[in-house]
């Protein structure tokens, strides 16, 4: 797990880090993690000068 995005607790559980990511590759990685996180535990919010990301398409089935 990328240390810029997660810290390990004493029990060894990964906890998302709150903070700002400025490096483009770190932002891309964080968005990728947030997209695959089914519980919504990881959330990437746009910067104040960045356009919000489009809403994902709902699953059809």
Image: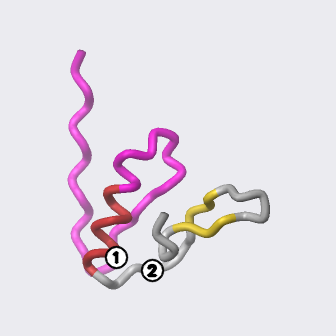
Magenta run includes residue 42: yes
Residue 36 is situated, as x and y percent measured from the top left of the image, at 37, 45
Magenta run includes residue 6: no
Q: Residue at x 25, y 75 (%)?
A: 50
Q: Quadrant of the C terminus?
A: top left
Viewed as shown, does residue 48 lie left or right of 6? left
- Secondary structure beneath dot 1 equals loop
Q: Residue at x 34, y 78 (%)?
A: 48
Q: Which mark is residue 34?
A: none
Q: Residue at x 62, y 61 (%)?
A: 15
Q: Provide the major secondary structure of the magenta segment.
A: loop
Viewed as shown, does residue 11 lie left or right of 55? right
Viewed as shown, does residue 40 lie left or right of 24? right
Q: Residues within 10 Å of mark 1 (few under 14, many from 20)?
A: few
Q: Which mark is residue 20?
A: 2
Looking at the rendering, the stretch of residues picked out in magenta corresponds to 33-61
Viewed as shown, does residue 12 lie left or right of 57? right
| Sequence-first tag of 2 and 1 | 2
Q: Between tags 2 and 1, which lies in front?
A: 2
């Amino acid at each position: 797990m990328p240390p810029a995005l997660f810290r390990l607790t004493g029990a060894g559980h990964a906890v998302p880090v709150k903070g700002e990511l400025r490096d483009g590759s770190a932002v891309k990685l964080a968005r990728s993690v947030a997209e695959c996180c089914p519980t919504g535990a990881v959330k990437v919010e746009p910067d104040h000068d960045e356009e919000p990301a489009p809403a994902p398409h709902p699953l059809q089935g």
